[in-house]
Image (tube, coloured by chain):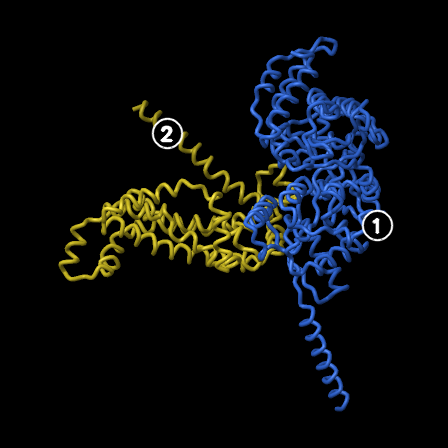
């Protein structure tokens, strides 16, 4: 009995420590937003009174609503298009198998290993020739067919019961109807998990928007947060405000879809 | 009734003429820079000043992170697509030669439009290739020894005691300050080669020679600077810090009595209003007994460049030459607003430059800084300053190890520390290939010389 109690205590102590380590950066971010730049630099851990000044300074530097609108647009449209294209591709790879499916897919996986920096300059030239520099289309198009997400959907589709598809065919559904009315509802959790992954990566995307977007009117949130960090004496308090604003949407999306996310990763098909 | 009609007519005429002026001169100059609070704000002030001279031109400031801007510029120049490049771009001085020499036709030489004798000489040199100069030299990184007047007074020193001192004297003062006040003399990030760079340039030398070739093997100044850095580390007068925030936090928070930095640090120091009136500013200490050693050096700073591909090249050059090389009032404004000390020398004639600053115990700091700028030895930062820096950074722990182990030795003992020597000789250096062997040899030779040949 005593032993079990001790074990419990030990577990809780360990978990508390890990929880503290995970939560501390958030705490630091929120406390930092209320302190002056000098206080943040010194490492003050208590709440200060500079929140108003920090927010005002941040909003005076950038057209924040515009930037948030841009980021939301890029993230939402990017997520929607990526999910449509990649889920259909993943479905096709698994359901309509030919002798080339596996070879083609292996080639895709090999392409995953090419670092983005190697593709950046050719990609930039392509997008520039297409006249898409400084447009959201230029930011979105190269990322829509994401090999990783196709891979993810293909793996999830392996768990999709073929009997369901066969039954639907016998009942006279067309192929697109099977995808839309049978596959889609069954794979809800997979879609939810993919939404979180794609949304977070497009919300946090930095390098490619940086290269493509040229004007202040088109900036996304990651670009303005990083531009504040640079300089001889960065305003740390305002940076914390910017970080909070930049982090909130992904947090909200995660908490909204959390249950489905876990289900999706576990790969449950009911 | 008639007067009203007249007024309307007048307005209409004015409106039409305004419109036509706008149509004729509606040009936009795009400027890329980093740090919205410093460089960005300076461009905006310049845009205001320029609007009085040429109201038809709008200045569009786009700011990025410094590393990001460099990456963007590099990508676009390397892709050879110039349509989307800005008209004017800010480049940090350390990287200037890399851009100018890697992309020889990308930037516009400004010799025909600017009188470079009006700028601090070292800033002109670093942006020149052959007989062409490409930059509009902007902010200076003139080095400054900021010190806490109150703590030094407790230890029995006056501001005059810190005027143009040597490093040896600095260590002496530091030890006394710690003895009396219990506070360390300065904060130092042992992984940052900034101090070594300051020492090198203060004696007119750099990682690279005037011809751009590596200047390390057999360079007496490099050896002297390394020796001085080692003495600094050995003296133990510093609070070891890690990272920029920790380093600046130490003096902003009042933990240390002085800091060796540059003019742009004024903004950081003033971040803590509680210490107002308790700061003073003097020149950087110099290396004792070295020929050519001065109390003046540089850390950071950047300049404006006009892209040769710009469609609004003429307007961009006009903007730079009318405001940045012609408007004394503008320089007063950014000095007061951003603490930006420009390198256009005639700006010193303005009122703000001659005023004294209460934060710095009423010292005429700005006038002093701008006098020091003229004295900074010019060096060639070469193509690979940032890469050389990384290689040096990798060796700093070894230097520290030697210094710490020597703190406990009496000065008369022969100094032979074999382990760090081996560590240095065998260390892998991550430099561009042509320099690797040179650097490795030189680090080993310098160390052997410093430590009685292991």
Which mark is on residue B145? Answer: none
Query: Mark 2, chain letter?
Result: A
Query: Does residue A96 appear to the left or right of B78 in the view shown?
Result: left
The part of the image, by quadrant, that contains residue A110 is top left
Question: Drawn colour of chain A?
Answer: yellow
Q: Is residue A241 visible?
A: no
- Label 1 sits on a secondary structure element that is helix
Give the residue at mark 2. A11
User: Of residues B151 and B96, which is closer to you in this image?
Assistant: B96
The answer to whether residue B294 is above or below residue B14 is above
Quadrant, the N terminus of chain B: bottom right
User: Of residues A28 and A171, which is closer to you in this image?
Assistant: A171
User: Of residues B400 and B3, which is closer to you in this image?
Assistant: B400
Give the residue at mark 1. B346
Task: Identify the chain drawn in blue.
Answer: B
- Residue A85 at x, y = what percent? 34, 55
The part of the image, by quadrant, that contains residue B226 is top right
The answer to whether residue A158 is above or below residue A182 is above
Report the Cα–Cα distance between label 2 and label 1: 70 Å
Query: Mark 1, chain letter?
Result: B
């Amino acid at each position: 009995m005593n032993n079990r109690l001790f074990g419990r205590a030990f577990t809780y102590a360990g978990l508390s420590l890990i929880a503290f380590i995970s939560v501390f950066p958030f705490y630091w971010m929120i406390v930092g937003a209320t302190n002056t730049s000098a206080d943040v630099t010194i490492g003050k851990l208590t709440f200060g009174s500079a929140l108003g000044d920090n927010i005002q300074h941040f909003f005076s530097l950038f057209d924040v609503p515009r930037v948030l609108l841009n980021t939301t647009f890029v993230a939402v449209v990017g997520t929607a298009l990526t999910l449509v294209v990649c889920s259909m591709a993943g479905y096709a790879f698994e359901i309509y198998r030919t002798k080339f499916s596996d070879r083609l897919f292996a080639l895709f996986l090999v392409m995953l290993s090419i670092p983005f920096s190697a593709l950046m300059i050719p990609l930039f030239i392509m997008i520039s020739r297409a006249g898409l520099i400084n447009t959201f289309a230029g930011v979105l198009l190269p990322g829509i067919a994401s090999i990783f997400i196709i891979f993810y959907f293909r793996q999830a589709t392996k768990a999709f019961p073929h009997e369901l598809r066969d039954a639907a065919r016998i009942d006279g559904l067309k192929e697109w109807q099977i995808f839309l009315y049978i596959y889609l509802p069954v794979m809800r959790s997979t879609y939810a998990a993919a939404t979180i992954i794609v949304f977070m990566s497009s919300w946090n995307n930095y390098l490619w928007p940086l290269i493509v977007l040229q004007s202040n009117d088109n900036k996304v949130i990651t670009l303005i947060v990083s531009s504040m960090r640079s300089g001889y004496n960065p305003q740390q308090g305002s940076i914390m405000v910017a970080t909070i604003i930049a982090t909130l949407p992904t947090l909200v999306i995660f908490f909204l879809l959390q249950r489905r996310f876990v289900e999706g990763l576990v790969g449950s098909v009911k | 009734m008639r007067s009203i009609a007249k007024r309307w007519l007048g307005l209409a005429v004015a409106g039409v003429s305004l419109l036509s002026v706008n149509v004729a001169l509606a040009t936009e100059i795009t400027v890329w820079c980093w740090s919205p609070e410093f460089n960005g704000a300076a461009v905006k002030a310049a845009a205001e000043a320029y609007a009085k001279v040429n109201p038809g031109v709008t200045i569009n400031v786009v700011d990025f992170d410094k590393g990001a801007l460099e990456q963007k510029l590099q990508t676009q120049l390397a892709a050879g697509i110039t349509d989307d490049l800005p008209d004017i771009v800010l480049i940090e001085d350390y990287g200037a030669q890399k851009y100018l020499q890697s992309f020889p036709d990308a930037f516009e030489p400004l010799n025909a439009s600017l009188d470079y004798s009006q700028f601090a000489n070292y800033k002109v040199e670093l942006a020149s290739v052959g007989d062409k100069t490409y930059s509009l030299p902007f902010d200076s990184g003139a080095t400054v020894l900021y010190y806490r007047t109150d703590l030094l007074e407790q230890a029995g020193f006056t501001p005059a005691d810190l005027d143009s001192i040597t490093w040896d004297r600095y260590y002496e003062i530091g030890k006394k300050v710690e003895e009396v006040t219990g506070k360390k003399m300065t904060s130092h990030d042992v992984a940052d080669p900034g101090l070594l760079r300051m020492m090198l340039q203060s004696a007119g030398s750099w990682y690279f020679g005037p011809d751009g070739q590596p200047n390390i093997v057999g360079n007496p100044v490099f050896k002297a600077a390394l020796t001085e850095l080692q003495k600094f580390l050995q003296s133990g007068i510093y609070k070891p810090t890690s990272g920029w925030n920790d380093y600046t936090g130490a003096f902003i928070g009042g933990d240390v009595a002085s800091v060796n930095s540059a003019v742009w640090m004024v903004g950081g120091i003033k971040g803590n209003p509680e210490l107002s009136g308790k700061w003073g500013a003097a020149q950087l200490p110099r290396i004792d007994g070295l020929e050519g050693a001065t109390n003046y050096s540089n850390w950071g700073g950047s300049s404006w460049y006009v892209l040769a591909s710009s469609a609004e090249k003429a307007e961009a050059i006009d903007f730079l030459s009318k405001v940045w090389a012609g408007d004394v009032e503008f320089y007063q404004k950014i000095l007061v607003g951003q603490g930006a000390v420009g390198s256009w020398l005639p700006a010193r004639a303005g009122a703000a430059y001659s005023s004294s600053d209460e934060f710095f115990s009423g010292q005429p700091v700005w006038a002093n800084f701008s006098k020091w700028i003229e004295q900074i030895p010019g060096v060639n930062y070469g193509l690979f300053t940032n890469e050389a820096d990384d290689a040096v950074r990798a060796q700093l722990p070894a230097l520290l190890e030697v210094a710490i182990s020597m703190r406990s030795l009496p000065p008369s003992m022969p100094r032979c520390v074999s382990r760090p020597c081996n560590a240095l000789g065998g260390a892998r250096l991550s430099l561009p290939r042509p320099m690797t062997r040179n650097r490795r040899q030189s680090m080993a030779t310098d160390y052997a010389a410093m430590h009685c040949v292991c």
